[in-house]
């Protein structure tokens, strides 16, 4: 631990000329690393001044480095008070932030300082994208994981795992869900060869793919179907995640929140939810960059490295431009209880959606059906939503007929995607997704 702390402190203290943080005012940089709190506040305000893609890199780097400095101070102060960890004399002499104070409790050290350090580091990853400090943040979090495991006998709380968290309440949630009868099934194939899949891509049709996830550790020896395993991979549930609150992002009462993984599990995954407006969903999040150890439990399907056929402009929504060439597939996690919905929308990438836990109902419409799907336009705040339909694909028939009379004429394909199965969604195809149970999926976008 001490070696990693020293290396980290050195990395954020000695800056190379090419470091983008040098574009920040010198008076600001003079406060780093000794006074991280005002720097975090300043950088936070800058992050909200611009659209994220337009935020100058120096402010993202400042937010990240100041957060790392604060986390180092919290960790060092916590170790000073720990009976089972010793620190070097240089550690106690180093100046620490005011928020790093932590005191012992009747001779047994609480690890609230661990919670604080994890929160600070995760906020740097979520808010600023870690800004080139991904390896440093991961090294610190890995050391905290080791600390929590090896010092467990001498501490009050560590990687706490609740009894009864060996599995999700899948059966109970499925009783609450309406499982559709499949009338227009999507073509399926068992692990097609690369050549066969490449030929299929030229048809621009979706495909259910079976038997391609059988080698994933997430399906077997490191099971994502185990809440206890997921808690362990998130430092006892301390890691922060962005959560969507509400049934769908098109609902009026939809919102977002950043909470700990344990809070997410307790509120939304391990209990019965009766109000759709209070459903929580970890949706389209790059969880695997934030928690690389989970990335080791899966593998990018070989199909994602096939050169895709040219995409017709007619296959894109009005607001979408042909996507830039990706060097590697984009991975996103989708994790939530029964009833979560991704409304009818389209993306400019080819997608293989892999179902690791639970089941999902998925309905697909080809780009040729777009005129019958009532795409949204530019909405309040200037947000272009033309890649999303106004229609609730499973809405009441009388409402659909009254407001969207052409929708019932739109032809579609559908499937229930089960554990271990994957679905190829061609770029530009409209898709509607509803979880039928507790569900954990991974999407792989490529072009």
Image: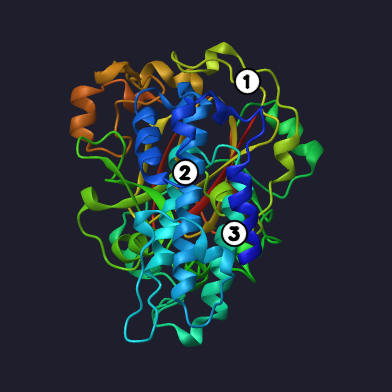
Foreground residue among 136 and 426: 136
In the image: residue 196, left or right of residue 115 = right
Which quadrant of the figure has residue 37?
top left
> Is the C-beta separation of discs 1 and 2 under 8 Å?
no
Colouring convention used in this rendered image of the protein: rainbow
On the image, numbered disc 2 is attached to which residue?
A: 66
Residue depicted at x 58% and y 47%: 289
Q: Is residue 163 above or below residue 21?
A: below
Disc nearer the start of the sequence (1/3): 3
Q: Circle 1 sits in a helix, a strand or a loop, which is it?
A: loop
Residue depicted at x 55% and y 37%: 131
On the image, numbered disc 3 is attached to which residue?
A: 5
In the image: residue 101, left or right of residue 201 = left
Q: Circle 2 sits in a helix, a strand or a loop, which is it?
A: helix
Crowd tier of the residue under label 2, counting other residues whose Cα lies within 10 Å: few below 14, some 14–19, many 20 or above: many
Q: CA distance from mark 1 to mark 3?
A: 39 Å
On the image, numbered disc 1 is attached to which residue?
A: 324
Q: CA distance from mark 1 to mark 2?
A: 33 Å
Residue 84 appears at what percent x and percent y?
A: 52, 82
Residue depicted at x 44% and y 13%: 318
Crowd tier of the residue under label 1, counting other residues whose Cα lies within 10 Å: few below 14, some 14–19, many 20 or above: few
Q: Is residue 254 above or below residue 259?
A: above
> Is the C-beta separation of discs 2 and 3 under 8 Å?
no
Residue 400 appears at what percent x and percent y?
A: 24, 29
Which quadrant of the figure has residue 262?
bottom left
Q: Circle 3 sits in a helix, a strand or a loop, which is it?
A: helix
Answer yes or no: is residue 188 visible: yes
Disc nearer the start of the sequence (1/2): 2
Crowd tier of the residue under label 3, counting other residues whose Cα lies within 10 Å: few below 14, some 14–19, many 20 or above: many
Q: Is residue 347 above or below residue 71?
A: above
Which of the two marks, 1 or 2, is nearer to us in this view? Answer: 2
Disc nearer the start of the sequence (2/3): 3
């Amino acid at each position: 631990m001490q070696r990693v702390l020293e290396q980290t402190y050195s990395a954020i203290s000695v800056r190379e000329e090419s470091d983008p943080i040098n574009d920040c005012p010198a008076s600001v940089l003079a406060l780093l690393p000794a006074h991280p709190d005002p720097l975090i506040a300043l950088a936070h305000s800058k992050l909200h001044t611009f659209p994220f893609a337009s935020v100058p890199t120096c402010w993202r780097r400042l937010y990240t480095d100041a957060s790392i400095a604060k986390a180092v101070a919290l960790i060092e102060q916590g170790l000073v008070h720990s009976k089972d960890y010793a620190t070097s004399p240089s550690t106690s002499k180093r100046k620490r932030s005011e928020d790093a104070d932590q005191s012992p409790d009747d001779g047994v050290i609480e690890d609230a300082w661990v919670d604080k350090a994890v929160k600070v580091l995760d906020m740097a990853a979520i808010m600023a994208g870690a800004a080139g400090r991904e390896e440093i943040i991961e090294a610190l979090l890995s050391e905290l994981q080791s600390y929590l495991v090896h010092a467990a006998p001498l501490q009050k709380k560590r990687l706490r795992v609740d009894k009864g968290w060996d599995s999700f309440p899948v059966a109970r949630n499925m009783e609450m869900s309406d499982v559709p009868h499949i009338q227009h099934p999507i073509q399926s194939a068992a692990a097609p060869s690369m050549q066969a899949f490449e030929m299929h891509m030229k048809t621009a049709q979706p495909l259910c793919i079976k038997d391609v996830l059988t080698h994933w550790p997430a399906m077997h020896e490191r099971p994502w179907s185990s809440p206890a395993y997921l808690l362990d991979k998130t430092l006892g549930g301390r890691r922060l995640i962005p959560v969507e609150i509400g049934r769908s992002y098109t609902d009026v009462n939809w919102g977002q929140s950043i909470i700990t993984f344990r809070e997410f599990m307790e509120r939304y995954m391990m209990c019965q939810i009766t109000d759709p407006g209070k459903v929580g969903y970890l949706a389209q999040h790059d969880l695997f960059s934030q928690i690389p150890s989970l990335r080791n439990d899966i593998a990018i399907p070989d199909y994602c490295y096939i050169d895709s056929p040219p995409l017709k402009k007619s296959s894109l929504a009005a607001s979408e431009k042909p996507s830039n060439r990706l060097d590697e597939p984009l991975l996103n996690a989708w994790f939530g209880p029964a009833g979560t919905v991704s409304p009818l929308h389209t993306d400019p990438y080819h997608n293989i959606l892999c179902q690791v836990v639970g089941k999902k109902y998925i309905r697909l419409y080809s780009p040729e059906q777009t005129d019958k799907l009532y795409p949204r336009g530019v909405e309040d705040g200037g947000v272009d939503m033309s890649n999303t339909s106004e229609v609730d694909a499973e809405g009441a028939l009388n409402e659909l007929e009254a407001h969207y009379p052409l929708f019932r004429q739109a032809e579609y394909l559908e499937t229930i995607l089960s554990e271990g199965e994957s679905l190829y969604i061609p770029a530009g195809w409209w898709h509607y997704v509803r979880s039928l149970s507790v569900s954990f999926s991974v999407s792989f976008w490529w072009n």
